[in-house]
Image: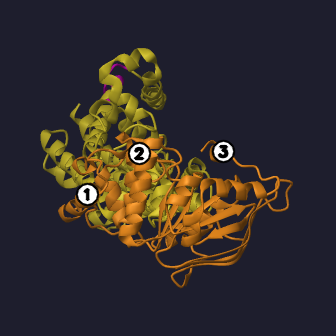
Amino acid sequence: MIVAVELGLIYAIMALGVYLTFRILNFPDLTVDGSFTTGAAVASIMIINGAPPVLSTVAAFGAGLVAGWITGILHTKGKINGLLAGILTMIALYSINLRIMGKANLPLLREDTLITPLRDAGLLGTVGALIVFGLLALAVKFIIDWFLHTDLGLAMQATGDNEEMIRSFGVSTDRMKILGLALSNGLVALCGALIAQYQGFADIGMGIGLILAGLASVIIGQAIFGSRVIVVATLAVVLGSVLYRVVIQLALQAGLNPNDMKLISAVLVVIALVLPQWKVFRRIGGLSNMKKALSGTGARG
Amino acid sequence: MLEITNVHKTFFAGTVNERAALQDINLSLAAGEFVTVIGSNGAGKSTILNITSGKLRPDTGTVTIDGTDVTRLADYSRARFIGRVFQDPMAGTSPDMTIEQNLAIAYERGKNRGLRPGVTRKKREFFQEELKSLELGLENRLKAKVGLLSGGQRQALSLLMATFSGPKILLLDEHTAALDPQRAELVSRLTAEVVERHGLTTLMVTHNMEQALRLGTRLIMMHEGRIILDLDQRQKEKTTVPDLLHEFEKIKGAALDDRTMLQ
């Protein structure tokens, strides 16, 4: 179970990236499936070729920035529908990721990675690792909180809330969307790099369906823990990510087939999206948060 | 301050729906001039505002603000010169953000937005002072989400946001039309005060003839994309609503829109 929480805390970085696009920019970005693997691929191939793990992980973040930037350019300058722009980048990245990796699976087993010190100290699977990964997730959370309250961050929030208004105050909404998408995918790729080092390999298929995990974390987290203000909303995303991994872990322990996990994830998200629309559930006070978190017009925070 | 020169704008050119929204418009506003614009539906009132704000580009002609040709500038690029209040009270503010965050966004109009905190203690004090001028008690609700405010409160806040960073031009697009009479009266009064206080060069579109006569220093009437009447302050003071209605009647076949008739 500790492993599930560990994973949840690492994946929280991805979920926070998804939060930036899905909630702040109001833009469901599917680039995530590709950019996650891109991050893993870039970090892994660099580590295998002898680059320091920190540099490799930073480079993965950079590669994610570029991936998000491309989706942003396609959407704003190419006037391509947002969903389609994300899908196009995601599909293109599949080939690019294969090029980066050279083959479909890159093992990191005998390499020094960011996780090696933890493993050597025997911390993995203990409270020690939880503290390390927890601090990492919180650090990313606090950076996002801070950023969203700067002049630039406020402009980004307003871009997702009321485009005409923020344009009338001299902000290029195109630029904000591109920046937000780049940052979001940078975080997703960073997460991919960490996951590859954590599990000891990068795989061409590791990002498939990841957007669902991200959305599930955001939606479930905010439904349960609230989203009235940004500092709460981002914490809810982190907790949502942990909860999601724990639920998956429980499902596996209950004897469900790992191959069915994508189906189960999809069903989870559908349930979380549909349930609050039913009157029976709306009347239950505790679920009012969920309704808000799920309706696009509700408190986005 | 604002020069609109030889501007033409045609919508749906080359189709059966082709409509000349503006035909050879020449309009010049001196600094501090407050022009109210009235006219029938489709007269081109909103088009003039949209051409000025950059939401629309003219087919021909130029728009110059304080000596700068802005004809080719995107709306957000020329926003540093222009404050706007929209007809829809929901349009001018960001509902999911707090009052102070909305003000902070407006405060940075046209500046380079960086990584400094959007709301600081110093700015907050300034916002409180400015909000007091609205006399709506909003200065005590800085952390309330704007979506919780009434239409009138939001419109008053929009007006403050559009004006307090000192734009060169203020554009008001029927900004009291969607409010109940009491709120409309409040926002009208605030408009007069704020324009007076900052000496703003203002272009205000309205359906309300009484308001058009009461506010401002000059009145223009539009019809089918042309300016058909231009009254300076002296003439405007002598004009009454029946006079304006009479002017409208002179236009053969002009369809007055229902809202105008009802007033």
Measure the alpha-carbon separation of dots 3 and 2: 24 Å
Quick one: B201 or B193, which is closer to the camera? B193
Q: Residue at x 40, y 55 (%)?
A: B189
* Badge nearest the viewer, 1 or 2: 2
Q: Is residue B262 magenta?
A: no
Label 3 neighbourhood size at 10 Å, few (<14), some (14-19), many (20+)?
few
Q: Which mark is residue A146?
A: 1
Is residue B100 rendered to the left or right of residue A77? left
Front disc: 3 or 1: 3
Q: Quadrant of residue B197?
A: bottom left
Residue under circle 2? B152
For the residue labelled by badge 3, is the local secondary structure a helix, a strand or a loop? helix
**Camera sees residue B261:** yes
Of residues B56 and B216, the one nearer the viewer is B216
Q: Which residues are magenta?
A: A248-255
Marks 1/2: CA–CA distance: 32 Å
Crowd class of label 2 (few under 14; some 14 to 19; many from 20; radius 10 Å): many
Residue type, mark 1 in image:
Trp
- Give the orange chain's letter: B
Chain for numbered disc 3: B
Q: Is residue A249 magenta?
A: yes
Q: Earlier in the sequence, mark 3 or mark 2?
A: 2
Label 3 close to label 2 by CB (< 8 Å)? no
The kind of secondary structure element at disc 1 is helix
Task: From the top left corner, tell me how far across and down residue A206 is, in percent.
Answer: 44, 45
Instruction: Give the residue type that dot 2 points to.
Output: Gly
Residue A7 to residue A269: above or below: below
Give the CA separation, mark 3 to mark 1: 53 Å
Residue B54 position, x and y percent, is 58, 68
Q: Which residue is mark 3?
A: B261
